[in-house]
Image (tube, grey):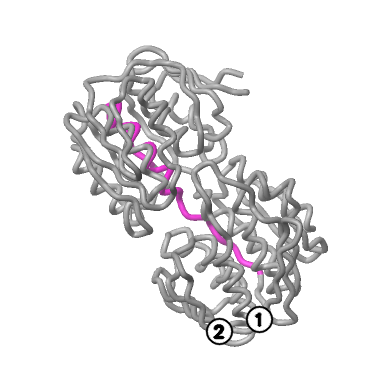
Amino acid sequence: MDKLLITGGKRLSGEVAISGAKNAALPILCAGLLTADTLALGNVPRLQDVATMEKLLKQMGLYIEKNGAVLELCGRDVNNLEAPYEMVKTMRASILVLGPLLARFGEAKVSLPGGCAIGSRPVDQHIKGLQAMGAEIKIEGGYIYARAKKLKGTRIVTDMITVTGTENLLMAAALAEGDTLLENAAREPEVTDLANLLVAMGAQIEGIGSDRLMVHGVPALHGATYDVIADRIETGTFLCAVAATGGDVILRHVRADILDVVLDKLREAGVVLTTGDDWIRVQMAGRPKPVGFRTTEYPGFPTDMQAQFMALNCIAEGNSRVTETIFENRFMHVQELNRLGAAIEIDGHTAAITGVPGLIGAPVMATDLRASASLVIAGLAASGQTLIDRIYHLDRGYDKMEVKLSALGADIERIK
């Protein structure tokens, strides 16, 4: 199992290119099931989760081929309408095949997702929404069996804001008969990116970017050429890395306009930021100032940036409080950060962080994707060597992170 060995204390400088967004690429790949035509997708990141999704879609009969920098998908020969447990258990986003299969083929058999380290993410909102559109759904033997001669448009109000739920229902509604109103819809940029792709494929959607999406169903969708949005979480992670270590770095291929709250908090921490159309320059000197925040749905502070900011708060000049409202088990990195000399105490869903002058390298273990990123940031800022185990979590959402950081001057290497 691969590990990362980091010798901390190096200032970062130079330029780094940010990859396409994992959380946009996964539903966009599933949209390939909605048409018999070809989708040509650019800026698809090379990640373990993307490879897993491609494997699942290929076994359904979706043609996927890399053509230079473009990923070509064709759904003409899709013939297997099942997502087996063996594949779904490794990635919860596999549930995103349910809506497209049901909408285009009238049936689907999809395994219920397994547990998740950071907390439960129930799929009941997906099921209730599809049932409201006329689908017959039964759950048996750990599988969702869904049938519908033709999905019918309706008004759907989800009990909670759910990103994958909104995406599944959006794809299903695109081919439904009549109009579907999705209320309490997720507003994340990745949802907006999927909606924009669907429009490029011929879907009719109003209210994109809001919590109220009106979808006018069409008989069929066609092919399109589309570039996946930049990864705002990878962007934020690199911004935090520079803030923790000092230096001067320009991030390329980014979208500052979908990172408002993250950029505001970084400025509060003393980071100097300059932004352009597709770049952000980050400059930092000295210790960061502590910043408190509460995670919430977009456009609030993203739960996927909580761990990285906590690593920053560990070495801040003062005390801070961080409250996690999205996932119940998303403080598993705290124990590992404390092994590096951080002073963090947990009380329910709130972490109280007392900033220390510096961290000291030690062996630590990654527990989930964003926790891994926080340990990398802490290791870069710590004195001495930090050895991070179980970095397969990191590879799920960051494309060659150690290569990008090395190019900026970090002393970091992957150990097989």
Quadrant containing the N terminus is: top right
Residue at x-position 32% and y-position 20%: 341
Magenta stretch: give its range: 223-251
Q: What is the spatial separation of the Cα atoms under label 2 and label 1, in whole angstroms?
A: 9 Å
Badge 1 amino acid: Gly
Q: In the image, is residue 368 part of the stretch drawn in magenta?
A: no
Q: Is residue 176 above or below residue 353?
A: below
- Nearer the N terminus, badge 2 or badge 1? 1
Q: Nearer the viewer, residue 251 or 128?
A: 128
Q: Is residue 186 above or below residue 112?
A: below
Return the residue found at the far top.
Answer: 384
Residue at x-position 40% and y-position 71%: 211
Res 141 seen here: yes
Residue 154: quarter of image: bottom right
x, y percent for residue 120? 53, 51
Indicate which disc residue 154 carries. 2
Q: Are marks 2 and 1 in contact (CB under 8 Å)?
A: yes
Residue at x-position 66% and y-position 81%: 134
Badge 2 amino acid: Thr
Q: Classify residue 71 as left or right of residue 191.
A: right
Q: Is residue 246 above or below residue 219?
A: above
Q: Secondary structure at mark 1?
A: loop
Residue at x-position 25% and y-position 42%: 266
Return the residue found at the far bottom.
Answer: 178
Quadrant containing the C terminus is: top right
Kindly identify which residue carries mark 1: 134
